[in-house]
Amino acid sequence: MSDALILNLVLFLPALGATALIWVPNQRGDVIRGLAFWTMAAQLALAAWLYAQFDPANPALQFATQLPWIPGWGVSYLIGLDGYNILLVLLTAFLGPLVVASAFTAITKDVKLFYAMVLAIQFTMVGTFVAQDLFLFYLFWEAMLIPMFLIIGIWGGERRIYATLKFVLYTAFGSILMLAALIYLVVSIHATTGISSFAFADLYRANLPVDVQVILLAAFGLSFAIKVPMVPLHTWLPDAHVEAPTAGSVILAGVLLKMGTYGFMKLGFPLFPQATQILAPAIAALAVVSIVYGACLALVQTDIKKIIAYSSISHLGYVMLGLVSFNLLGIQGAVMQMVSHGLVAGGLFLMVGMIYERCHTRDLAAYGGLAKILPFYGMFFVILALASVGLPTTSGFTGEFLALLGYFVSAWPQFVRGDAFPLVLAATAVSGVVLGALYMLWLAERLLFGAVKAPHQPFTDLNGREKAILAALVAAIFWLGIFPAEPMGKTELAARHYQQTVTATARPAVALGEAP
Amino acid sequence: MNVSMVLTAMLPEHLLLAGIVMLLVREVTAGKPRAAVWVALAAVYAAATAALALALQGYAAAPFPGQLSVAPPALLAKAILLGLAVPVLLISRDEFPDRQFHILTLSALYGACLMVSADSFLTLFLGIELLSLPVYVLVLLAFRRPESAEAALKYLVLGGTASATLLMGASLLYGWSGTLELVAFARALGSSDPLAVAGALLVLVAFFLKAAVAPFHAWAPDAYEGASVPVTTFMAVIVKSAVLLAAVRLFGAAPLSAPMVGVVALLPLVSIVWGNLAAMRQPGLRRMIAYSSIAHAGYLFYAFLGEAGTRFEAVAFYLLAYGVMNILAFSSLPPHADDAARDRLDNLKGLFQRRPYAAVTIAIAMLSLAGLPPFPGFIAKFLIFKNVITAGYTLYAVLGLVGSYLGIYFYLRVVQYLFMSAEEATPSRASPGALAFGAGAICLAAGVVMAVLPGWVLGLL
């Protein structure tokens, strides 16, 4: 079996699994759960194999498949792995089985539809990451809304309809402008060069006037910034997170939010480099506002899920900051932070779900001293909380530290030249680290320590399934924290490519379509 | 007149006529109307196959020069109209087993075929009338509610106005150019002579009236709601497709003059925005689809902003995606003793719990009509807006896309009712008949082909 075929399998396995579910009778919940879980597990195994096979020294697209799809428009089915998406594909595949396993007891209504939708969204998420053709990317990007709409809307909490409509209408608005921008981009390249292509590699070499670049980056960026989300476009996130079922929250925090930062890194910034250089200070400022504002909001919440939701806004601000540092440290840090946040926030949402399943409330005031009665729960929560704070040896440290360091490194020469703004931003961003420690440790303190307080005592500690899920997450978090060099080696060439593309003052004078 | 050419070029029409004659004869001789739907289906299917076969051969002929000619685009247009008519007939059987319905439907299809091969305003008018007159009767045919009479009357009056406007425009164009051929319209588009502009505008208004483009749309919601579900489907799919495909022929290869761009962009834009806004507040699926079809007429006329060579492909693909999904939605609508209550959105609440297949197909249809990927409606919308931007009208494209965003909400609301609401106290448990199910399966299969292999479908067009 060729390697390219395996990548196709990684992409299509969840879709096949969802299709197979149609023929499983509704009342066979065990078969449905088993089918969904093993589909995800098989996907993870294949994705891990591809990760091991991935050659970090090869800058080209690996395991690529290219088939003409709509030849008249220059649209092709073009997928492949590179340093940009390899870790994110692995992260998505890694979270897949955990998400499925976390829902075994939590979801009792319309079980078949639920797992079909989880598999469907897995398909579209992997598709968004592996697509190397803008039309295909947009197709997956937008198709993702539909399963998420149903997951929040059917299995969500009290205000689920409001939350899911808000989520879809927010993100769809960004997407519609991105659609206009991407058509304009392809059409204008066609008009100047005669080449009609949606392939990223061709689009990277477009030479657009700076004013056009700014408008197009604004349109793409709006869509990505809503997904990240960056303040002030974040208001859908707390509602969606709080109302979503646990599995939905994990998917949202673990993978969906990374779509936005991945979009910036893979498309928004490299496609419009001059506009990016112009807008970089504004983007950095928004990122810092997101870091500090998200952390402040997390500090004052009383709903455990909301605290973690707002912490996501804060943590993804570091990713954006790293991306606009334009040096290798910051970019690599941003990539690590994406993966780390997926694991840590995913894990925290899972833990909130586990306590909610037992006590049916997320009100922090109802809890206290859980570590005494639930020792395993307490242990895992503390580890995840410390990873979220960025304790060294956890993945959170690698990402946050490198992203901040990278931004400092790029801010310093500007300060020497007389522009203090970036340095002020960097200093402010550091305060986010302090605030992050504050709200996260305070949350752990109120939840786990002090006088024992909980509704419906006594309840049971984590069962084997839950321990296994959390142990897998914690293992991954430590792996990224202690051996970051290995995954960072896989992404280094992509980080260099990103850096060169975005900082190049002029595009190489190569006509489009010359390369194979 | 070359008899064999007339026989070949108008083969689809002849097959329809044979079906009509057969049904009329049976009406006199036989009692039970059971076989009516099969005769009609056979005639329409044969006609669609004939049109497609001729189109694929690249057949072109002018049996009545200056009045009627066929070439692959016209033949493909007929194949699309007749192909879409097959599932419409299938979903009609449960409500209309009688022959009158099928005779009227076949006559209307004959008119639709004439419209898309017309070369002169006379043939065009003949086609429009032959299409419209049976539909007035069809609206009244299942006379169960007073609203049906109101709907038929409104449709008749507005249809009459459209015909009068078309004739007035045609006569002005005749006065200006001395010819009744359709090319006069295309030439008038590029002229600044007041007579020509007035004639072209009147003709355009007639088409806007027929296609329900704002501000000429007000009849559509009442007419769609008053008719029974299969007739609503016929109006929303076949009549609209015939009008749009005839409009492509009417515009021909002419580039639009600057003032015409304003008319062809602004009114459809208003249509998109208004149709989508008004659809948000509708309590029933038929009324909602009526407003949605007003918005879709807007997208379709947007295609005329594109370069002349791209219009047919964009309109045809869009109509296929739009038609297939409309029929799919209506084919899965559970029957109800009270026709007026059948499509009330409240009755769709919790449909997934009792009829999962119907709920999923209606949801697919809604999401496709909303233009969300991966459904064919997205690819159709993409093609139209790509052509508009290629032609340089970026601002109109952005406004149109933002207008289309407004539509997402009410389509999602239907999905919300289907999946996320509790069941009504006394839901209808009846299921659509086998033929309606078959129609849905055909449409679903066609939708899958258009979504997975859009390149192949576009290659045919």
Image (spheres, grey):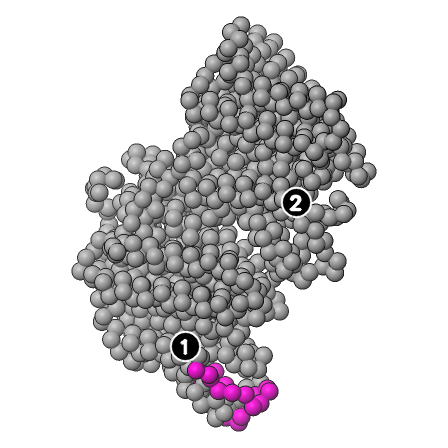
Residue A226 visible in the current orientation:
no
Q: Nearer the viewer, residue A355 or A281?
A: A355
1 and 2 marks on the same chain = no
| Relative to B26, A260 lies left or right | left
Q: Which amino acid type is shown beneath numbered disc 2?
A: Gly
Kindly identify the residue that appears in the image at 70 percent across and 33 percent down. B34
Q: Position of residue B377 (x, y in %)?
A: 51, 42
Count how many numbered circles sit on residues in the image: 2
Chain under label 2? B
* Mark identifier at residue B433: 2
SS assignment at label 2: loop
A482 to A208, vertically: above or below? below
* Mark identifier at residue A469: 1
Q: Main secondary structure of the magenta part?
A: loop
Q: Position of residue B172 (x, y in %)?
A: 62, 13
Q: Which amino acid type is shown beneath numbered disc 1?
A: Ile
Chain under label 1? A
Question: Is residue A442 one of those drawn in magenta?
Answer: yes
Quadrant of the rendered image containing residue A257: bottom left
Kindly identify the residue that appears in the image at 32 percent across and 51 percent down. A79
Q: Position of residue B31 (x, y in %)?
A: 76, 28
| Relative to A199, A102 lies left or right | right
SS assignment at label 1: helix
Q: Nearer the viewer, mark 1 or mark 2?
A: 2
| Relative to A464, B370 lies left or right | right
Q: Position of residue B392 (x, y in %)?
A: 43, 33
First to last magenta residue range: A441-464
Furthest toward the right, the residue is: B146
Residue B32 visible in the current orientation:
yes
